[in-house]
Structures are given as structure tokens and as C-alpha cells.
Image (tube, rainbow, N blue to C red):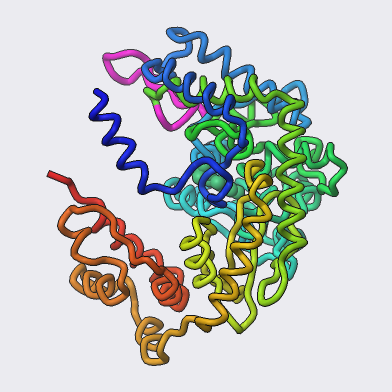
């Protein structure tokens, strides 16, 4: 057993660190060791428990209702509100869209109106559930254009969605205006607060300017908020809250159309581990309201110091409403090289491709744990920018740009993709022989190529890449 665990630790050593505040995407670190210990212990204690049937594991139902109750307090939910623990933000968004669609079986070609900054989970929902996504460009401040969204609502609209905040730019959409427009048409309005829902209420309590976005806004019918982000719970939990049980009703799936147990689910999974739910409950109990207020104080101090420390070739794309910061560069360097330089210095910051005329950026999801190392972060960032300026912006040859722009992903064969992946430097022999993932040390060239490609081509290339990585190790 010790050998297996030692091997596990060896494997894990190649991953991004989940503690220490130096990974500014994917992971959220409270910096509190006892919180981690409690989360882990709860996952372990409930790893075998099955959330399939709350009457068989009533403790899971108790914990779910307590978590939803806590969130109701945070999100100004009325007494009528109900909620469900899901496996993550994507599942919460999927279910919000599915429930909105199934509330209107009479609409044959349902659609949802979303801002261009909405999370990709909405496009996944559109794809899975056949709900057309009407994508409305955001304004120059990267916030949803409420008037344009209102104008996009029609008789087929089953849902309007906004973000609090958006992932890529960290700003809160004009929820009051959009929700009012939706309500005026009798349409559901979902607020995707997956990443901000647990921290924005504390920001408001700290006296920071936070636009109103919760159930306090009359037309808001549902809210998603992830526990595995700023509730600092282990991975695997999010909440989907509805204003009333009637709004949630279409989310349930029941089937007695077989000889086994009557299947009855509020989520997409049926059998599911009790571990993540128990861990989220335990972490929320341990941190508590005062603890989250203190953690919010720490994370916003880190955000403010980062924003204040940005200068030279770097700029903050838009002043952040929450804990997410997007950085852009001037022409003296490029964001992808800055990301590589940060990685070389032991920091993970996330490259974001150019999109809809907006330039490529660097994404930071700041954690409370980052505060302890924020001076080191700014030093590393300064050094990384300097190195990126010395290297000069990564360029893609004009012929290569023309070649990539002319590619139609739908017309490419598997062999074409093999060639493209090899030429782009994304795939060496290692992956194809099952030796695991060996990415180039520097991703800037690959990212610059992807940045030139259309969104459809990016999707196709990266799908081909993932497909080649995903091969049985025999
Ligand atoms: C993270 C996120 C999601 C998706 O959540 P997952 O937990 O990654 O599935 C949806 N919306 C926003 C705004 C997010 O930040």
C-alpha cells in the first residue's frame, strides 16, 4: 500500500501545486491548513456513500439542505428558494438551461440570450440540450449590454443569463437591468455566479462597491455558485438555487419505466460519491461566516495590491469587480511569453486567447493564500515582463498566418491533424507512444499559433490534441 501511495505522490509531483497561492487558475487556496485537513477527512469518510438515494443516506440530505440554507443567506434568497448541490459549475449551468427548456415544452426551437462573455458551459448546454445560444456582444467595459440583450429576447427565449462576475474579465454584468427585461417578458434569468457567488457578498460587506446581483434583484430566477471555488471546498461541488420550487421542478428526472428501483435525480449524475458534498459541508462549517469575511478581506487585499502593482508594458484590462484580474500587454511583449516566464519562476497564470476583437490576456484567479506571497508575485511578474520584452513579442510568419486562416477544420482529416499537431510543437512522440504528456517547456509559440486560428480551428486542434493524449496505457 505504501508503494502505491508513494507512486501516487510521484505522479502528483508533476501537477500544478494546489497550495501555496502560486497557482492563479484552476485552484483556490484558503491558506488554512486545518480547512484542508477537514475537507480531506470528510472526502475520505464519505467516499463510499451514495448520493443516489437521500432516504438511504439521510446525512447527505441534511448536509445538502444546510449548505443550501447557508447559501440562501448569502444570496438574499426569499423564503421560497430551493437549491441542489451539483458536481460543479458546468453541471449547475447545464441544469439551469435544461430546466428552462423543459419548462416550455411548447416552444419547439428554444433559445437563450447570453452575453459574449458568458462561460463556455452555456455553449455546452446549448449543444447538449438543443437550446440555441443567442450571443449578444458586450459593451466596451466588457459588461453585458442590457439594452441589446433585452432586444434579443423573443417568443422562443426560455432563458436569459448574465455573469457575476465573468470569468475572462472579472466584471459583474448589469443584472438589475437584464433581469428586469427578462421578467417583463416572463422569461427566466439565471445569474452565473459560479466563481463570484461566494465572495461577492463578503466584498459588499467589506464596503467594496458591488453592483446588486443576487435574489435581491426581483427578476433573478436562479443562481449558480461553486463551492469548489471561493468556498474553498475540495473539488466536486457547486450549488444551483432557484427562487421557487416551481422553477426547479423541471430539473428533476424520474423514471419508473424499468424493473429496478424508481430512479429519481435532481442532478445529471445518479450514483454519486458523498465525498465532495460532505467535504463542502465540513469546510463551510469550519470556515463559517466570520471566516469567509476574513478570507475575503485577505483575497481583496491581494487583488488591490496586484492591481496597484501593475505597470510598464502591462495593464489591467478593466478594474475588477471581484477576485479575477485580466492583464494585457503593450506591443513590446506578448502575454503568452509572460505566462511562460512566470511558469519558469514557479507561478501559474493562465493565457486567454484574443477573442471578438479583444486582445489576448493573462488571467489571474486570486486566492486568499496569494496574499502571503503577493510581493513575490509582483517581483516574479516584473521579472517575467522584463524577460518577455527582451525576447520580443512572439511572432507567427505571415505565410503561416495565411495558411492557418485558410484552414477549414471541417475539411481536415485525422492525418492532417496529426501533421498540424506535430508542426505546431504540441505533440511529440511521447504522447503517441503512451508515455504521457510532455508539453514543450515554452508554450508561447503554440499559443501564438492558436491565437491566430479561428475559434472553430482552436476547438478542432485542441480536440485532436486531447484525443491523441487520451490513449490506453497497456
Ligand atoms: C468555473 C466557472 C464555471 C464552470 O464551472 P466548473 O466548476 O469548471 O464546471 C461556470 N461559470 C463561471 C463564471 C465560472 O467561473
Observer-nearest residue: 424 or 64? 424
x, y percent for residue 131: 50, 50
The N terminus sits in image quarter: top left
Residue 247 within the magenta-colored segment of the rendering:
no
- When asked about the image quadrant of residue 143, the answer is bottom right
Residue 276 as seen in the image, left or right of residue 295: left
Q: Is residue 214 above or below residue 402?
A: above
Residue 273 as seen in the image, left or right of residue 170: left
x, y percent for residue 287: 67, 25
x, y percent for residue 125: 48, 48
Observer-nearest residue: 449 or 193? 449
Q: How many marks?
A: 0
- Residue placed at 70% from the left, 23% from the top? 288
- Residue placed at 40% from the left, 17% from the top? 50
- Residue placed at 67% from the left, 58% from the top? 325
Q: Is residue 409 above or below residue 171?
A: below
Q: Is residue 119 visible?
A: yes
Q: Which residues are magenta?
A: 251-269
Magenta: main secondary structure? loop
Residue 264 within the magenta-colored segment of the rendering:
yes
Q: Is residue 283 above or below residue 171?
A: above
- When asked about the image quadrant of residue 376, the answer is bottom right
Q: Is residue 100 visible?
A: no
The C terminus sits in image quarter: top left
Residue 414 as seen in the image, left or right of residue 457: left
Observer-nearest residue: 281 or 252? 281
Q: Residue furthest left?
A: 474
Q: Residue furthest right?
A: 207
- Residue placed at 78% from the left, 31% from the top? 76
- When asked about the image quadrant of residue 103, the answer is top right
Amino acid at each position: 500500500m505504501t508503494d502505491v501511495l508513494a507512486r501516487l505522490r510521484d505522479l502528483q509531483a508533476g501537477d500544478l501545486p494546489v497550495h501555496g497561492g502560486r497557482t492563479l487558475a484552476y485552484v483556490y487556496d484558503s491558506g488554512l491548513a486545518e480547512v484542508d485537513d477537514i475537507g480531506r477527512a470528510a472526502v475520505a469518510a464519505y467516499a463510499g456513500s451514495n448520493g443516489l438515494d437521500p432516504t438511504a443516506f439521510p446525512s447527505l440530505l441534511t448536509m445538502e439542505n444546510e449548505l443550501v440554507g447557508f447559501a440562501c443567506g448569502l444570496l438574499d434568497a426569499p423564503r421560497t428558494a430551493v437549491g441542489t448541490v451539483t458536481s460543479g459549475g458546468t453541471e449547475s449551468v447545464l441544469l439551469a438551461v435544461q430546466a428552462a427548456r423543459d419548462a416550455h415544452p411548447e416552444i419547439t426551437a428554444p433559445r437563450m440570450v447570453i452575453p459574449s462573455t458568458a462561460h463556455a458551459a452555456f455553449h455546452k448546454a446549448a449543444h447538449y440540450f438543443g437550446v440555441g445560444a443567442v450571443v449578444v456582444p458586450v459593451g466596451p467595459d466588457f459588461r453585458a449590454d442590457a439594452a441589446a440583450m433585452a432586444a434579443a429576447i423573443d417568443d422562443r427565449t426560455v432563458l436569459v443569463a448574465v455573469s457575476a462576475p465573468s470569468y475572462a474579465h472579472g466584471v459583474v454584468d448589469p443584472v438589475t437591468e437584464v433581469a428586469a427585461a427578462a421578467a417583463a417578458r416572463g422569461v427566466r434569468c439565471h445569474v452565473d455566479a459560479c466563481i463570484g457567488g461566494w465572495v461577492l457578498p463578503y466584498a459588499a460587506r467589506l464596503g467594496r462597491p458591488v453592483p446588486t446581483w443576487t435574489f435581491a434583484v426581483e427578476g433573478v430566477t436562479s443562481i449558480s455558485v461553486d463551492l469548489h471555488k471561493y468556498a474553498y471546498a475540495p473539488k466536486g461541488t457547486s450549488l444551483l438555487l432557484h427562487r421557487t420550487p416551481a422553477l426547479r421542478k423541471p430539473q428533476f428526472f424520474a423514471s419508473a419505466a424499468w424493473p429496478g428501483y424508481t430512479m429519481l435525480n435532481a442532478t445529471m449524475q445518479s450514483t454519486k460519491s458523498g465525498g465532495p458534498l460532505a467535504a463542502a459541508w465540513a469546510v463551510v462549517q469550519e470556515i463559517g461566516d466570520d471566516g469567509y469575511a476574513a478570507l475575503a478581506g485577505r483575497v481583496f487585499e491581494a487583488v488591490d495590491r496586484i492591481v496597484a502593482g501593475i505597470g510598464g508594458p502591462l495593464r489591467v484590462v478593466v478594474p475588477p469587480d471581484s477576485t479575477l484580474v485580466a492583464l494585457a500587454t503593450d506591443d513590446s511583449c506578448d502575454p503568452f511569453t509572460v505566462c511562460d516566464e512566470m511558469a519558469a519562476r514557479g507561478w501559474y497564470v493562465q493565457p486567454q486567447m484574443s477573442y471578438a476583437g479583444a486582445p489576448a490576456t493573462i488571467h489571474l484567479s486570486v486566492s486568499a493564500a496569494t496574499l502571503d506571497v503577493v510581493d513575490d508575485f509582483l517581483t516574479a511578474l516584473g521579472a517575467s515582463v522584463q524577460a518577455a520584452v527582451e525576447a520580443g513579442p512572439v511572432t507567427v510568419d505571415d505565410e503561416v498566418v495565411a495558411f492557418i486562416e485558410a484552414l477549414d477544420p471541417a475539411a481536415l482529416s485525422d492525418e492532417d491533424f496529426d501533421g498540424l499537431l506535430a508542426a505546431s510543437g504540441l505533440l511529440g512522440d511521447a504522447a503517441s507512444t503512451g508515455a504521457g504528456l510532455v508539453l514543450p517547456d515554452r508554450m508561447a509559440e503554440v499559443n501564438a499559433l492558436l491565437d491566430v486560428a479561428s475559434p472553430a480551428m482552436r476547438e478542432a486542434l485542441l480536440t485532436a490534441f486531447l484525443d491523441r493524449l487520451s490513449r490506453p496505457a497497456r
